[in-house]
Image (spheres, rainbow, N blue to C red):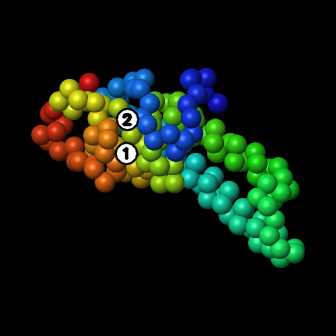
Amino acid sequence: MSTGSRRSPPGSDDTPPEPERIWTLGEANALLPRLSIAIGAQLVRASEIERRFRRLQAESASAGGPVAFAQLIATCPDLVREVAAYEDGWVEVQNLGVVVKDARIGLCDFYGRVDGQLVWLCWRYGEPSIDFYHDLNAGFAGRKPLTGATLHRLMN
């Protein structure tokens, strides 16, 4: 686990935290190989957790009916450890200075500046580089391409 400051897991608060760091496009893009590996591992872990939980639900149903979530999880301490590792994995990603916006799809934002205004440099797992940005109050649907004109205006 990283020794950096601990942040809340993704999805725990919709308010963006105060920027600890403002990224240049080059700095953010340089982190993508490491970030891609970490997020890829998280997505695989999430899929495995979901698969195991569905199997546990099916087993409990075939054994005589529905079982409370807490009872079901208590029967599988290794699944509890895997869920804790999953949560810690996202905290480690956030400790890199990345803001995780949607853990299900690996959507991350980096604070940056365009025309002196604080913006989100927006990246989604699987994209080869950061090619979009959006205002702090806009979401994924408000992404704008980092075109030649915008790239010229992008500044730290």
Residue 141, picture quadrant: bottom left
Callout 2 touching callout 1 (CB < 8 Å): yes
Locate residue 98, reporting x and y percent.
45, 35
Can residue 146 be spotted in the picture?
Answer: yes
Against 100, residue 125 (above or below) is below
Determine which of the numbered discs, if any, sits on residue 110 in the image: 2
Residue depicted at 47% across the width and 54% down the height: 105
Residue at (42%, 43%) from the top-left corner? 108
Q: Height in image: 58 above or below 12?
A: below
Which disc is residue 70 wearing?
none
| Element at label 1 | strand
Q: Position of residue 46 (x, y in %)?
A: 61, 54
Give the residue displayed 17% in from the left and 44% down from the top: 147
Q: Quadrant of the C terminus?
A: top left
Image mark for residue 123: 1
Name the outermost residue toward the left.
Answer: 149
Location of the N terminus by quadrant is top right
In the displayed structure image, the side of residue 5 where residue 112 appears, left or right: left
Separation (CA) of disc 2 from disc 1: 8 Å
**Depth check: 5 or 136 in front?**
136
Amino acid type indicated by mark 1: Trp
Answer left or right for 118 relative to 94.
Answer: left
- Give residue 151's quadrant in the image: top left
What amino acid type should be assigned to the residue bearing mark 2? Phe
Q: Counting other residues with Cα less than 10 Å from the Cα at mark 2, is it few (<14), some (14-19), or many (20 or more)?
A: many
- Residue at disc 2, secondary structure: strand
- The percent coordinates of residue 114 (x first, y second) are 21, 32
Marks 2 and 1, the one that precedes in the sequence: 2
